[in-house]
Amino acid sequence: MYQPSHFVETRSAVLHELIRTRPLATLVRLDAAGELQADAVPLLLEAGASPHGTLRGHVARANPLWRDTRFDAPVLALFQGPQAYVSPSWYPTKAETGKVVPTWNYIVVQARGTLRAIDDAAWLRDFVGRLTARFETGRAAPWSIDDAPSDYTQAMLRAIVGIEIELTSLVGKWKLSQNRTPAEREGVVAGLRGDAARSGDAQAAALADAVAGWRAPD
């Protein structure tokens, strides 16, 4: 990933928070034939399991991912944060010199590691329980794996396989106009919030908050 120094994010807590809040990863791997494959897979992060953390998830048993991945090659999990177009008209510099061009702001985390498949009913039941608890917490009537009939649950668990990725690297890119002047950054925030108000674009609103709230590492 192209990484100008002003966009690099290395703080583990910041990277982990993005993964936790946006857990749907694009998981890129080499299959047994040496072809690139990509799947959308929700992944849970366990931060203390290894130096960079461990990602865990599950896929359908029918998905070839767990059988034909090149397990001797690393996989890449991409986590996408908010993203939006940035208009040059938002910069005060446009009125002053006209020397501005459009760009795109975004947040992304790339996680690399070694994938292994876990075909174990007890592991899967425990993981699915934790996965659903993570996303059901706070609902008026949270669903639990124990709400379904036991025989049905067992059949569903037999239809999936667990995956685990022990991370060897974790890299973030927070492209939030850090290379612009404070006045230009304020213009970007105002412009994104204006777009969000007009169109209801939740991504523009979230990105405006990210630009406004970004602070350099101590």
Image (spheres, helix red, strand yellow):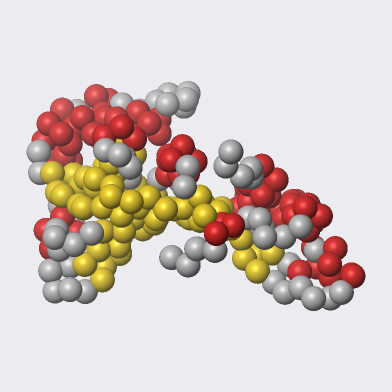
Q: In this view, does 182 lie above or below 150?
A: below
Q: Quadrant of residue 7?
A: bottom right
Q: Is residue 191 above or below residue 102?
A: above
The residue depicted at 65 percent of the width and 69 percent of the height is 103
Image coordinates of residue 134 in percent, x first then y, are 38, 31
As drawn, which residue projects farthest toward the front? 218
From this viewpoint, is residue 161 visible? no
Q: Nearer the viewer, residue 40 or 7?
A: 7
Location of residue 218 in the rendering, given as x and y in whole percent from the top left corner: 58, 38
In-front residue for pair 126/48: 48
Residue 164 lies left or right of residue 190; in this view the side is: left
The residue lying at 43 percent from left, 40 percent from top is: 12
Q: Quick one: quadrant of the N terminus?
A: bottom left
Q: In this view, does 6 lie to the left or right of 57?
A: right
Query: Where residue 32 appears, x then y in whole percent?
Result: 12, 69
Q: Position of residue 124 (x, y in %)?
A: 17, 36
**Residue at horizontal 46 percent and vertical 52 percent from the top:** 172
Q: Determine whether, in the image, residue 27 is placed left or right of residue 62.
A: right
Q: Which residue lies furthest to the right in this view?
A: 96
